[in-house]
Image (tube, grey):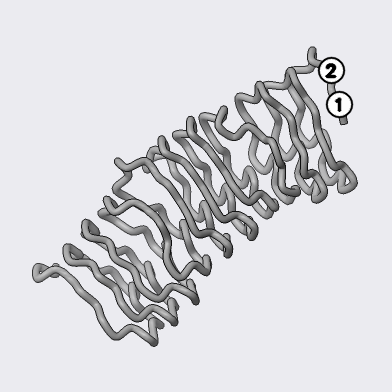
Amino acid sequence: VVMPESLQIIEESAFYKCSSLKSVIAPGVTNIGIAAFYGCKNLNDVYIPKIQSIGDSSFGGTGALNGFPFENLNKVPDLAFAKSDIFKVNLKNATAIGERAFEKCRSLSEVYIPNADASQMGYGIFRECTMLKLVEFNEKIKVLPDRIFESCDFSSLDCIDTIETIGSNAFANNKALNSISMNYLIRAKDCAFKDCTNLMFADFPNLRKIDAEVFSGCSSLTTLTLSNNIE
């Protein structure tokens, strides 16, 4: 699909489940509505250089979206790319990431969101992103939202070391996670590492508050380092 440069808005559900759609060229589009390309499972090539905002689920269930200029977005809404085949995301300008924005993106391996604000990050952002290996956050982030990495399968994760609070179920059900270290972690909320059955070593020298079921089901856990001032 090639759109005229005069077109600035693609409305809600405009191409909903157009499963044969393979490419979109929209040089003048700045805004894309809710579910506009939802279910376009073969949409792999996208050229939308002036994009400023997208709606909920706008690219859910699409293909790889090669060439999509994520870096222009200031906000990624709820379920925006859930179940899509994207493999690398650069959101250099985004400060807000909605709930389950990248849930079940099972080809996604690298994410760069250097300006994200923890207070504007929803739950389950990368839930079930089973290929995820590298996440670069804003170095000022102190809190990981609930379920952010639930059911991911990384054995280790390159992430910042300034986290002070881990949300509920943040790393739950990660069957590959073997060891983890967070030097500044103070609190782990309910079920943070629940059912991480391969987790053997956890090093949290400043962890002082452990909520319910944090390590429930961690059947391989042998070494756990905590603060001497547990509350």
The residue to which callout 2 is attached is 4
- Say which quadrant the N terminus sits in: top right
- Mark 1: which secondary structure? loop
The C terminus lies in quadrant: bottom left
Residue 101's label in the rendered image is none
The spot of residue 42 in percent (x, y) is 82, 48
Which residue is nearer to you in this view: 106 or 151? 106
Q: Relative to 145, is 205 on the left or the right?
A: left
Write the residue at 39% across / 62% down.
168
Res. 71 image quadrant: top right
Residue at the top extreme?
6
| Residue reaching furthest to the left | 228
Disc 2 versus disc 1: distance between alpha carbons? 7 Å
Q: What element carries label 2?
A: loop
Nearest the camera: 110 or 202? 110
> What's the amino acid at mark 1?
Val
Between 164 and 136, the one lying in front of the other is: 136
Q: Residues within 10 Å of mark 2 (few under 14, many from 20)?
A: few
Q: In this view, does 84 lie above or below 67?
A: below
Percent across and percent down for residue 211 are: 28, 68
Disc 1 packing (10 Å; few <14; some 14–19; many ≥20)? few
Q: In this view, does 132 lie to the left or right of 80?
A: left
Q: What residue type is labelled 2?
A: Pro
> Which residue is located at x 43 percent, y 73 percent?
177
Query: Which residue, as the protein is rendered here, is positioned at the far right?
Result: 20
Q: Tell me what residue is drawn at x 56 percent, y 51 percent.
A: 100
Residue at horizontal 38%, vertical 54%?
159
Q: Which label is found at residue 2?
A: 1
